[in-house]
Every structure is written in structure tokens, then in C-alpha cells.
Image (tube, rainbow, N blue to C red):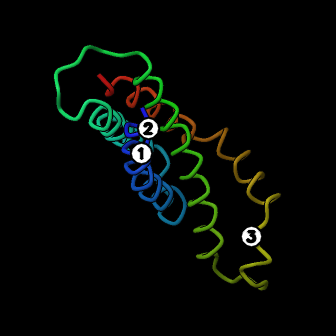
Amino acid sequence: MARAALFGLAAAVHVALVYGVLADPFGLSWGLIIVGLVGGFLIGAAVVRGAFNGRFHLIVPRVRWLAAVVAVVCWIGAALVAYVSSQVFYQGAATPLMDRLSVSGLIDYLNSTVFSPSILGLAAMAFMAWRGAK
């Protein structure tokens, strides 16, 4: 299971970077659902590849749930990437970057993503990771 988690996290890093950059600097909103579907499938496939290495296997529920958990961690990482990139590319900022990056700002940013299409991207990513890990 450790190898499966490592493979899944390796795929999740790439998916989080793409998802986070498309979320805020590019302002993609409803398209994040498609990014979540594709990214979740990639995460699920990576977890299965790490778990079974191409050998014949039956569907294992633990592997599927591991893929879904990795997808949720990926979405949190993508939200962090989106927050940092929104502060880096903020136009007309009067304060330095390090003053704009704060934990309270991140929490406010996460609260705003809960009521946006980004949360549907999370649901799509977790479902496709769970479904793709077969």
C-alpha cells in the first residue's frame, strides 16, 4: 500500500499544480470539473499501478478508498497553489508578498472555494479517483 500511496501522491502533485494554476490566475471555474474528472482518473490509475504493477487483480476496496483520499489531499494542495498564485499575480498590490500570505487569508480563500464550482471539481476528482482505481 505504501508504493500505491507514493504513486498516487506523485500523480497528485502534478494534478494539483495544473488544477491550482487553472483555478485562480486563469480564472477557470466550471472547467475545473473537467480538470477534476481527468485528474481523478490519473490519480486512480497511478494508485492501481503502484499497488499491482500491471499484474492481474480483483477490485480491492482499500485501494479505491486510498485513491479517493489522495484525490482529496490533491484538491487541498490545489487550493493552496491557487491561493499562493492569486497573491503572487495580484495586480496593484501595495503590500509585500509575504505580508499578503497568511493562514487567515488561506482559510478565507478555502471558505470562498466551498461555495464555488471548485467544490464540484473536488467531488469529481474524488469520484473518478475512486472509480479509476479498479
Quarter containing the N terminus: top left
Secondary structure of the residue carrying tag 1 is helix
* Pointer 3 residue: 101
Task: Report the side of 107 relative to 20 (left or right).
Answer: right
Task: Report the side of 66 relative to 82 (left or right).
Answer: left
The amino acid type, in three-letter code, at marker 1 is Leu
**What is the x, y in percent for residue 129?**
39, 31
In the depicted structure, whether residue 128 falls above or below residue 108: above
The amino acid type, in three-letter code, at marker 3 is Leu
Q: Residue furthest right?
A: 104
* Pointer 1 residue: 6
Within-10-Å neighbours for mark 2: few <14, some 14–19, many 20+: few
Residue 2: mark: 2
Residue 34: mark: none
In the depicted structure, whether residue 50 falls above or below residue 130: below
Q: Are marks 1 and 2 in contact (CB under 8 Å)?
A: yes
